[in-house]
Image (cartoon, rainbow, N blue to C red):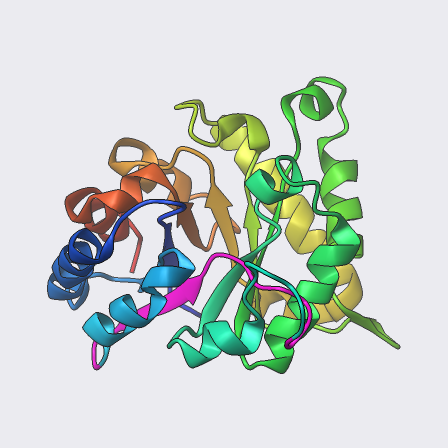
Amino acid sequence: MTVQKKLIAGNWKMNMLHMDAAALAREVVAGADKAPCDLLLCPPSTLISWVAETASGSVVAVGGQDCHEADSGAYTGDVSATMVRDAGASHVILGHSERRHGLGETDERVRAKTEAAHGAGLVAIVCIGETEEQRDAGETLNVLSSQLDGSLPTGDNGFAVNGKDTVIAYEPVWAIGTGRTPTVDEVQAAHGHIRAHLTASLGEQAEDIRILYGGSMKPENAADLLAIENVDGGLIGGASLSADSFLAIADAAPA
């Protein structure tokens, strides 16, 4: 097992134009050396190359927010994994709840995109999580298992993923952008279940796969969330649009 630093990833979603994005990236880069964790910025596809240029030579990595499963073709408006990589990214977010529930993305499509990301040399951040209705019905753990099984590439002996090419992000849908967060016990139960499900397929190698928590993580609650067993970092939405807030979350990560 390789002990990895926590990963704090900022998902800028559909925000920022060039000048503001460059300024935010510069601020993050300026404070990055003091962070006790790995840092990742995921801007819109139009800004990947600008942010990658700003972060070049620093410890800050850059990712995309989605990719198409095909390498090229008649897919107006989409970008392929190889394009994301060519723009300067090393990671890509896949299966975010805003795409699963807002755009109807299925587990099968997320799996195809994950395979494309791996083929392009990108680290896939595969998002999973339950809706409020599913949690209230007591279905959370079953939903997480089903999404892992459907969204991760498989081989002859189980999941065909490892700690170098895949990160899992647990994002309870009802907590994203709402200001609500699960209790410590609820987060611990979800992350422990994800780890156990990965271990059942991968054995000890599952310990190398980082599991991020996403869903209204902010400076005020980051230390408590990042101290939970099997929480290996955070996928940060709104708080990543401020360098001060993003770096404060990073500073809360245990070294």
Is residue 2 shown to the viewer in this render? no
Residue 18 on image: x %, y %: 22, 58
Is 5 situated left or right of 213 in this image?
A: left
Closer-to-camera residue (44/182): 44
Residue 232 on image: x %, y %: 46, 55
Location of the N terminus (image quadrant): bottom right
Q: Identify the residue at horizontal 47%, vertical 77% (top origin).
A: 85
Q: Identify the residue at horizontal 26%, vertical 66% (top origin).
A: 51
Residue 198 on image: x %, y %: 71, 59
Residue 252 on image: x %, y %: 26, 47
Location of the C terminus (image quadrant): bottom left
**Residue 29 appears in which quarter of the rendering?**
bottom left
Number of marks: 0
**Residue 25 appears in which quarter of the rendering?**
bottom left
- Range of magenta residues: 57-72
Is 134 situated left or right of 21 in this image?
A: right
Q: Identify the residue at horizontal 17%, vertical 51% (top origin).
A: 20
Predominant secondary structure, magenta span: loop
Is 212 situated left or right of 19 in this image?
A: right
Residue occupying the far right of the picture: 156
Does the magenta-highlighted stretch encompass residue 67? yes
Is 38 situated left or right of 138 in this image?
A: left
